[in-house]
Amino acid sequence: MGTVRKVADMGYDAVQFAGFFGTPASVVKRTLNEKGIRVAGSHTGLDLLTDDKLKETILYNKKINNDLLICPYLPEEKRNSRDAYQRTAEQFNEIGRICQQNGMRFAYHNHNFEFETFSGVTGFELLFGETDTELVKMELDCFWANYAGYRAESIIEKYGNRVVSLHMKDMNQGKKSIEIGAGTLDIAGLIHTAKNQGVSWLVVEQEDFDRDPMDCAKTNQDNLRTLLTTN
C-alpha cells in the first residue's frame, strides 16, 4: 500500500491495480479512504475470472469500491486463430454477463498482438465484433495501438462509449514507452478525443525507465494534468 500512498500524495485521483498480492480488501479500502483516492479498475487475469474464482474476485473488488474488472492479456491459445478469438469472445460475454448481474463492468486491455490479421480481419476486430457491446467494454492502450500502426483516436471514435478507459503513455523514437509529453504521440489529440467520447479514465502507464519510476510517475501526473487543462 506504500505505492498507493505515494501516488496519492503526488496528486493522482485514482489508482488502477494489477494484483493485490494477498492484501486483505479491508486494508486496501482503509488505505484508499485515508488518502482520498479512488479505484480506476483492476487488471485481473483470466484464471481469476472463471467459475468460483470470478465470484471471489467480484466480492473482493466490491469491498474496495471498484466496479471495473479488466482482463489485461490473452495467452497464445486464446488468440492464435480466428476460431480462438471467437471462443474467447464467447467466454468474455459470459464473464461480462456475470459482472453485469453483480453491478460490475468488464473490459479488455489490448497490446499489439490483437492487431494481427486472420483472413483480413484483426483479432481486435474479432474480439470486439463478436462480444456484446453492453457486456464487454474496452480499455484501449493507446501506445500499443499506435505501435501496431493504428490511430488510437480513430479506434476511440469507432467504439464510442464502449471505451471506458485509456492507457496513456508516450512513445520515443525507438518505440519505447516514455513520460507523457516527452515522446512522439499526439497526447493532446487523444485527450480531446477522450473528452468528446466521454471516456471515464485516463490511466498513466509506463513500462521503460531511465530514472526512478516514482519520479517518472510524478512527471506523468504533472504533464497529463497540464494537458487536461489546456485541451
Image (cartoon, rainbow, N blue to C red):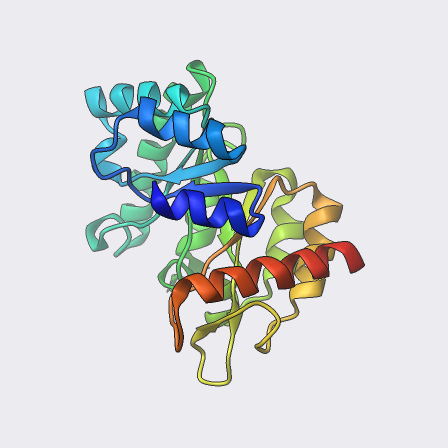
- The answer to whether any part of residue 231 appears in the image is no
Q: Horizontal placement of 71 versus 145: left or right? A: left
- Image point (74%, 56%), residue name: 192
Which residue lies most toward the right here?
230
Is the N terminus in the top left, top right, bottom left or bottom right quadrant? top left
User: Residue sitting at 36 percent across and 30 percent down?
Assistant: 28
Could you tell me which residue is drawn at 53 percent across and 60 percent down? Answer: 218
Farthest residue, direction bottom: 173
Q: As displayed, is residue 194 above or below residue 106?
A: below
**Which quadrant of the view contains residue 58?**
top left
Q: Position of residue 206 (x, y in %)?
A: 44, 63
Q: Residue at x 40, y 20 (%)?
A: 62
Q: Is residue 74 left or right of residue 102?
A: left
In this rendered view, identify the residue nearer to me: 119 or 223.
Answer: 223
Residue 154's x, y, as percent? 64, 59
Q: Quadrant of residue 118?
A: bottom left
User: In terms of depth relative to the viewer, which is nearer, 161 or 204?
Assistant: 204
Quadrant containing the C terminus in the rendered view = bottom right
Q: Taking the image as drawn, is residue 38 in sight?
A: yes
Q: Position of residue 66 (x, y in %)?
A: 45, 28
Question: In the visual, does 215 lie left or right of 71?
Answer: right
